[in-house]
């Protein structure tokens, strides 16, 4: 294992002030690279740029290494955060498995990388906040305060620079997996399930899209925010600034606040109907479908088992249907109280990969994924999120995602296979799971509006219902 490397060491100096909210795209474009966007339904929106510190790690111990590096970074601080949401946090993510970032388009992405942003806009219930942070032996309160004044002048209340750029359009698409190859690999996986070697495996595909015009980062993130307000939205730029990993995922891996843990079992999928009545019918069918319920219960049971060694109590909510813009999923919310104070990365490591993106038994499923998928998963389906000085944090599962460079996007989507899965239906499900990102790449459609403000409430396209 390569030890975690911090490009700076404590002390950490951070200053925050309230500002007038700027327009999202104008702020995004004005921030230094590498930029981060993090937004979750129950969390403040963070739009950040630059790095006061960068923590990277690789190999099987990358979770422990990042944990040690964050403990080191947060060891001593001179912090005036003004509001809790603007306290120093590192943002980043992990590769799905070690070795997953070896090939195109993942080379710029380390197997684990977290950034303490230099400049951060935080949009919380109690206002918009601008933070400047420095870390290392040169960090000085006077210099941080001077920079904060400059950033307030640059960013506060900044208006949109013009109309939102259109979707880039797609010139051509390439699949990593042909329909024939897919049928063959699904059949082989189902044989392993039939023979009792495997109970479930999640196989994914990648889709490369050549773009007609330059990928518009800020506009794409704004449009995803409008369509997926109740998903976790994320965007991470690697240090070279060339590419960007982004997405809007319905799946929380884990959040920890004090000793309270929240997580989701999300697995089992159907489409959306043409009418509200058809939507309802599909949701009812999903709740009653033995194959999908089995696929879902394997995830819910495993998440509970994985949490058990850490928990004083665990409770699962009712299984419901989570309705998104293009698909509907079975969803069980799970909460736990820990038996002791713990770091969020202990839980991330214990839970990842859940059988919602890996399979069961985990080792056999990962072997099958390696042997079958002709591309690197990179950060797809892996944990992305944040960590604070107290070891609290929130992580999502980075699905419904893509890596984009100015002229190309690579999209990823997968499906859970159990004994009675059908290769053609699973193929169709993958196409539906590409839609959230593909819709933002394909040519312009009527009815697009101009840029909204940072954190402006968007139309709610999602809902949840029980049976
Ligand atoms: C693997 C993905 O999605 C996962 C697989 C699901 C399924 O097979 O039903 C549902 C939600 C996710 O847990 C993906 O979107 O890429």
Image (spheres, helix red, strand yellow):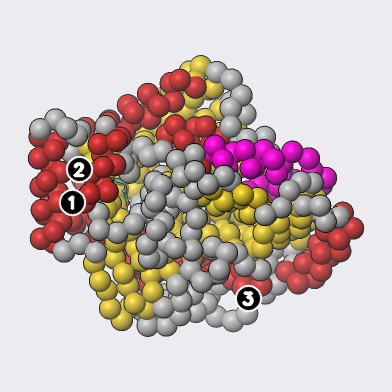
Q: Nearer the viewer, mark 2 or mark 3?
A: 2
Q: Are marks 1 and 2 in contact (CB under 8 Å)?
A: yes
Spatial CA distance of label 2 from label 3 is 45 Å
Segment tinted magenta in the rendering:
63-90
Q: Residue furthest right?
A: 142
Task: Give percent across and percent down for residue 437.
Answer: 37, 64
Q: Please, is residue 465 above or below residue 226 in the view?
A: above
Quadrant of the image occupied by residue 343:
top right
Circle nearer the N terminus (2, 3): 3
Residue closer to the observer: 152 or 98: 98
Q: Residue 465: within the magenta?
A: no
Q: Identify the residue under disc 1.
A: 426
Q: Identify the residue under disc 3.
A: 160
Residue 395: in sight, yes or no? Answer: no
Circle nearer the N terminus (1, 2): 2
Task: Give percent across and percent down for residue 273.
Answer: 23, 55
Residue at 47% of width from left, 51% of height from top? 111
Mark linked to residue 417:
2
Residue 317 appears left or right of 431:
right
Residue 390: in sight, yes or no? Answer: yes
Circle nearer the N terminus (1, 3): 3
């Amino acid at each position: 294992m390569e030890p975690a490397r911090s490009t700076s060491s404590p002390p950490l100096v951070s200053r925050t002030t309230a500002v007038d909210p700027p327009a999202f795209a104008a702020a995004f474009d004005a921030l230094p690279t590498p930029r981060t966007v993090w937004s979750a339904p129950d969390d403040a929106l963070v739009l950040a740029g630059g790095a006061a510190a960068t923590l990277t790690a690789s190999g099987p111990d990358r979770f422990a290494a990042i944990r040690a590096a964050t403990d080191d970074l947060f060891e001593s601080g001179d912090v005036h955060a003004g509001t809790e949401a603007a306290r120093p946090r590192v943002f980043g993510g992990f590769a799905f498995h070690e070795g997953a970032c070896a090939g195109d388009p993942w080379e710029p992405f380390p197997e684990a990388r977290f950034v303490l942003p230099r400049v951060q806009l935080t949009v919380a219930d109690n206002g918009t906040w601008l933070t400047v942070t420095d870390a290392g032996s040169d960090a000085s309160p006077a210099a941080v305060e001077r920079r904060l004044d400059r950033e307030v002048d640059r960013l506060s209340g900044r208006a949109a620079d013009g109309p939102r750029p259109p979707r880039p359009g797609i010139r051509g698409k390439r699949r990593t997996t042909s329909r024939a190859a897919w049928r063959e690999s699904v059949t082989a996986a189902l044989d392993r399930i039939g023979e009792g070697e495997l109970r479930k495996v999640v196989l994914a595909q990648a889709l490369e899209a050549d773009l007609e015009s330059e990928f518009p980062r800020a506009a794409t993130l704004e449009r995803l925010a409008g369509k997926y307000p109740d998903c976790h939205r994320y965007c991470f730029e690697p240090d070279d600034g060339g590419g960007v990993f982004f997405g809007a995922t319905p799946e929380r891996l884990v959040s920890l606040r004090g000793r309270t843990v929240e997580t989701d079992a999300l697995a089992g999928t159907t489409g959306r109907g043409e009418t509200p009545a058809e939507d309802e019918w599909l949701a009812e069918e999903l709740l009653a479908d033995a194959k999908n319920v089995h696929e879902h219960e394997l995830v819910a049971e495993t998440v509970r088992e994985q949490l058990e060694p850490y928990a004083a109590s665990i409770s699962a909510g009712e299984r419901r249907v989570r309705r998104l813009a293009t698909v509907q999923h079975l969803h069980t919310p799970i909460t736990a109280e820990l038996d002791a104070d713990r770091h969020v990365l202990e839980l991330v490591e214990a839970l990842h990969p859940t059988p919602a993106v890996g399979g069961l038994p985990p080792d056999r499923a990962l072997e099958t994924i390696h042997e079958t998928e002709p591309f690197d998963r990179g950060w797809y389906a892996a944990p992305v999120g944040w960590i604070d000085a107290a070891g609290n944090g929130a992580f999502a599962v980075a699905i419904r995602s893509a890596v984009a460079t100015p002229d190309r996007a690579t999209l990823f989507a997968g499906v859970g296979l159990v004994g009675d899965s059908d290769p053609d239906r699973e193929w169709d499900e993958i196409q539906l799971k590409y839609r959230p990102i593909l819709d933002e790449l394909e040519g312009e459609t009527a009815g697009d509006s101009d840029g909204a403000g940072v954190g402006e409430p968007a139309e709610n396209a999602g809902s949840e219902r029980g049976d």
